[in-house]
Image (cartoon, helix red, strand yellow):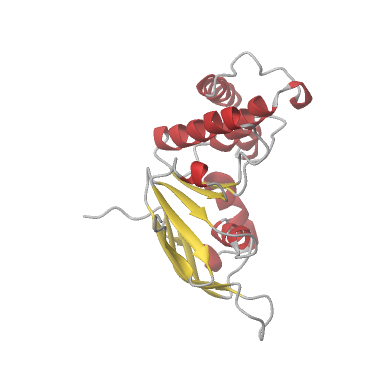
Amino acid sequence: MTATPVLQCRGLGKRYSPAGVALLDDINLELHAGEYLAIMGESGVGKSTLLNLLAGLEQPSAGQVILDGTDLGALDDDTATLLRRRHVLPYLSVGQNVALPLDLLGTPMPERGERTRAMLAAVGLETLGARMPRELSGGETQRIAIARALVHRPRLVLADEPTGNLDPRNAAQTLELLRSQVKAQAGAGILITHSRAAADTADRILVLDARGLHAFANG
């Protein structure tokens, strides 16, 4: 029996006025647990809009986004917010506190501390828990962001150009860390990127363009 996908898109479309040209049209996608996917595309093709739709931050004009069997479009605002806290990180961004997602979810203090320490150790920053973000290097900041993204064990991680401001060495380390931690937690991940080198760290690559979302064709 085939496992239910973590994420499904069915005929997903987005336009910003009833008569406007569709930015996204008939996007179909399945993502299973343990799968790490890269989506590439030129600026302006709708990559960030697609990410917002997958995260439930925008409503589609057509189609469905289904997360773990739940249609995001059928949820009221409060339920959708709670689901995002538990399952989805829309973007990897600098966190003031790795434990914040656990706090928002009401995780008991002893478990919160244990999981935070374990996550910091997993990203190699167990000695930096007391530092302020301004005291961190770019690479350390990005690893802290990944720790915050994954500490609550989300089923789906969406990362929009997470290494755009890093040097090649830190970028490579960050991409490997993101991939390995998504896999270790049996989640699923989507990486949005312009970089072919970054996309090559994924299990498969899709391209978003005027024709829609399709498999990357090398050469």
In the image, 83 versus 34, the foreground residue is 34
Quarter where residue 14 is shown = bottom right
Q: Residue furthest left?
A: 1
- The tally of labels here is 0
Compared across the picture, whether 3 is left or right of 63 comes to: left
Residue 214 appears in the figure: yes
Residue, x 65% and y 25% (percent of image)?
140
Q: Is residue 74 above or below residue 39?
A: below
Residue 107 appears in the figure: no
Compared across the picture, whether 214 is left or right of 124 comes to: left
Measured as percent of width and height from the top left, residue 57 is found at 63, 59
Measured as percent of width and height from the top left, residue 4 is found at 33, 55
The C terminus lies in quadrant: bottom left
Quarter where residue 56 is shown = bottom right
The N terminus lies in quadrant: bottom left
Q: Is residue 38 above or below residue 162?
A: below
Measured as percent of width and height from the top left, residue 23 is found at 61, 72
